[in-house]
Amino acid sequence: DAQESRGLGDVYKRQTQGEALMEFAKLLRDQQRYIQAKHYYLRAEALPSHREPAMLGRAKIAIEQGQYSDALHLIGQVAKENPKRTDLVSTIATLKNLVRNDI
């Protein structure tokens, strides 16, 4: 069915677009081009399939820039939206200590 085929093509295009946005954001982050990287992570965040990894990418930037409160907010939001991410508990605790001690 042409309608179904077109729908699957749209899903594939969005998936590919999201992957490209994430790869480009990571490349920019690795080059410490944080403002540009944040822009691409935010664009990827708009795609439901890439929301979580994009938020975590922005959190990594915040940590690299010493913006621990921002990182805590982002990681906390990911944990709230996906309670199965128990792997984030220790990171959240560490960030809370950093924010509390204002390091």
Image (spheres, grey):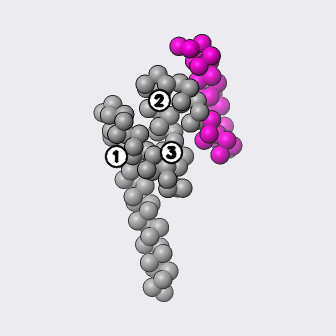
Secondary structure under the numbered disc 3 in the rendered image:
helix
Q: Amino acid at mark 2?
A: Ala
Foreground: disc 2 or disc 3: 2
Residue 17 image offset from top left, x and y in percent: 39, 58
Q: Which residue is mark 1?
A: 24
- CB under 8 Å between discs 2 and 3: no
Question: Considering only order in the chain, which callout, 3 or 2, is on the residue closer to the N terminus?
Answer: 3
Crowding at mark 1 (Cα within 10 Å: few <14, some 14-19, many 20+): some
Residue 57 image offset from top left, x and y in percent: 46, 39
Crowding at mark 2 (Cα within 10 Å: few <14, some 14-19, many 20+): some
Crowding at mark 3 (Cα within 10 Å: few <14, some 14-19, many 20+): some
Q: Which residue is mark 3?
A: 53
Q: Residue at x 47, y 29 (%)?
A: 62
Residue 8 in view here: yes
Q: Which residue is mark 2?
A: 62
Q: Residue at x 43, y 44 (%)?
A: 41
Question: Considering only order in the chain, which callout, 2 or 1, is on the residue closer to the N terminus?
Answer: 1
Residue 30 in view here: no
| Magenta span contains residue 100 | yes
Task: Give, as a single range, the part of the protein colored magenta.
Answer: 76-103
Instruction: Calculate the distance from the C-alpha at mark 1 to the C-alpha at mark 2.
Output: 17 Å
Q: Amino acid at mark 3?
A: Pro
Q: Residue at x 45, y 85 (%)?
A: 2
| Magenta span contains residue 26 | no
Question: Considering only order in the chain, which callout, 3 or 1, is on the residue closer to the N terminus?
Answer: 1
Quarter location, residue 15: bottom left
Residue 95 image offset from top left, x and y in percent: 58, 24
Secondary structure under the numbered disc 2 in the rendered image:
helix
- CB under 8 Å between discs 1 and 2: no
